[in-house]
């Protein structure tokens, strides 16, 4: 009887110790996630980053392509650039994932809806988990946002609708502007606090009537979406684009822009020559990021171009009110 009692007490003590150890462990995780110093995103100086020397760019035979569906590139520890495999959709769209304290923002969701072909949510979840582990964060909220309202940039939006802890900005002009608190589109320039990371947002229509440009004060990246990239700039509203491109120049005058980043690569490395429309293979692509000199060429174009047509520049083609399927191929 005494033996049994002592054994019972022994077990009870062991359970008690286990409870205390477990509690400390749980408390420790919760405590450190809550009390680790907040990540800081200073506006002074510049958080540097790296672009890959080459992006994955499709293959001669799309059917035999063995590259990942989504290329994930860490520009720096809190900034990810994703690219859809060109063998899945020739648009080869770029998407962006910016992190702040307790929050991540996904800008654009590619050109393919099917999670089997294009598992964007799974890939984004993996990135967030890895980031949380690395930076002692937990319960990161995801904001699903868009650069503009064209289907090759929101096709996998559907994958996120039932995701917990997620804000869906929405796919109407009204929902987009309400989220960013833009009351006077496109003129208004607003700042947005992404968990301590300051973004500057403004309307840049011309390619599409709800497009936004985003300047990230921490990295000095200026995101220009589909209204300015190395490719065929399809402009539905020339006058709007003229105002938008000049506004980008004025933003670059006000803020120390490091690179212009965007959504597609369609130019070859040969000045003024694009890849064929719809190609799923782009060997020897030029970089995605662009320079302020290239922006100045575009500003110059706004003074030169007076009528609809295709205008060829070294680093982009201007399709001024010309259907997208019109080709410059000989
Ligand atoms: Zn577009």
Image (spheres, helix red, strand yellow):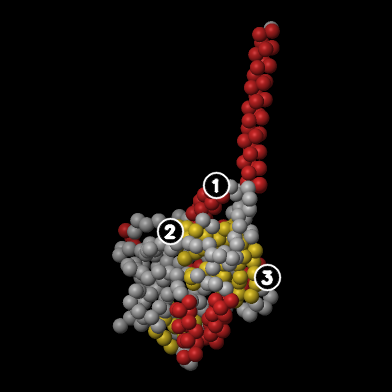
- Where disc 2 sits, the SS reads strand
Horizontal and vertical percent for residue 151? 51, 69
Q: Residues within 10 Å of mark 2 (few under 14, many from 20)?
A: some
The residue shown at (61%, 57%) is: 40
Q: CA distance from mark 3 to mark 1?
A: 32 Å
Q: CA distance from mark 3 to mark 2?
A: 32 Å
- Where disc 3 sits, the SS reads loop
Query: Which residue corresponds to mark 1?
Result: 133
- Residue farthest along the bottom direction in this orientation: 306
Quadrant location, the C terminus: bottom left
Residue 74 shows in this picture: yes
Looking at the image, residue 58 sits to the left or right of residue 239; the answer is left
Front disc: 3 or 1 = 1
The front one of 215 and 283 is 215
The front one of 50 and 93 is 50
The residue shown at (30%, 65%) is: 60
Q: Please tell me whether residue 122 is drawn above or below residue 188 in the rendered image.
A: above
Work out whether mark 1 precedes mark 2 in sequence or the reverse, and give the earlier one: 2
- Quarter-of-image position of residue 239: bottom right
Work out whether mark 3 precedes mark 2 in sequence or the reverse, and give the earlier one: 2
Horizontal and vertical percent for residue 13? 67, 21
The residue shown at (32%, 67%) is: 283
Dot label at residue 181: 3
Horizontal and vertical percent for residue 296? 48, 82
Query: Which residue corresponds to mark 2?
Result: 71
């Amino acid at each position: 009887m005494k033996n049994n009692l002592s054994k019972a007490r022994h077990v009870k003590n062991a359970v008690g110790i286990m409870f205390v150890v477990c509690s400390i462990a749980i408390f420790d995780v919760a405590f450190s996630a809550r009390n680790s110093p907040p990540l800081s995103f200073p506006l002074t100086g510049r958080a540097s980053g790296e672009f890959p020397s080459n992006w994955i760019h499709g293959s001669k035979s799309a059917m035999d392509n063995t590259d990942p569906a989504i290329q994930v590139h860490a520009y720096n520890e809190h900034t990810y650039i994703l690219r859809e495999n060109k063998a899945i959709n020739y648009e080869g769209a770029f998407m962006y994932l910016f992190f702040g304290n307790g929050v991540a923002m996904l800008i654009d969701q590619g050109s393919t809806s099917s999670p089997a072909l294009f598992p964007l949510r799974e890939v984004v979840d993996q990135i967030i988990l890895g980031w949380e582990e690395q930076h002692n964060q937990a319960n990161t909220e995801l904001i699903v946002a868009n650069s503009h309202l064209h289907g090759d940039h929101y096709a996998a939006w559907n994958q996120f609708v039932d995701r917990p802890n997620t804000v869906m900005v929405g796919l109407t002009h009204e929902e987009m502007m309400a989220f960013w608190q833009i009351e006077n589109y496109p003129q208004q320039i607003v700042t947005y606090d992404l968990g301590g990371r300051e973004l500057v947002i403004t309307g840049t229509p011309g390619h599409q009537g709800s497009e936004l440009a985003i300047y990230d004060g921490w990295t000095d990246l200026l995101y220009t979406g589909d209204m300015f990239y190395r490719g065929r700039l399809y402009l539905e509203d020339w006058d709007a684009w003229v105002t938008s491109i000049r506004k980008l120049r004025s933003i670059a005058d006000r803020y120390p822009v490091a690179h212009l980043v965007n959504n597609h690569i369609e130019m070859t490395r040969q000045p003024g020559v694009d890849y064929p429309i719809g190609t799923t293979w782009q060997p020897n692509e030029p970089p995605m990021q662009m320079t302020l000199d290239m922006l100045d060429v575009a500003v110059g174009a706004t003074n030169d171009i007076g009528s609809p047509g295709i205008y060829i520049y070294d680093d982009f083609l201007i399709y001024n009110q010309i259907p997208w399927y019109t080709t410059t191929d000989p």
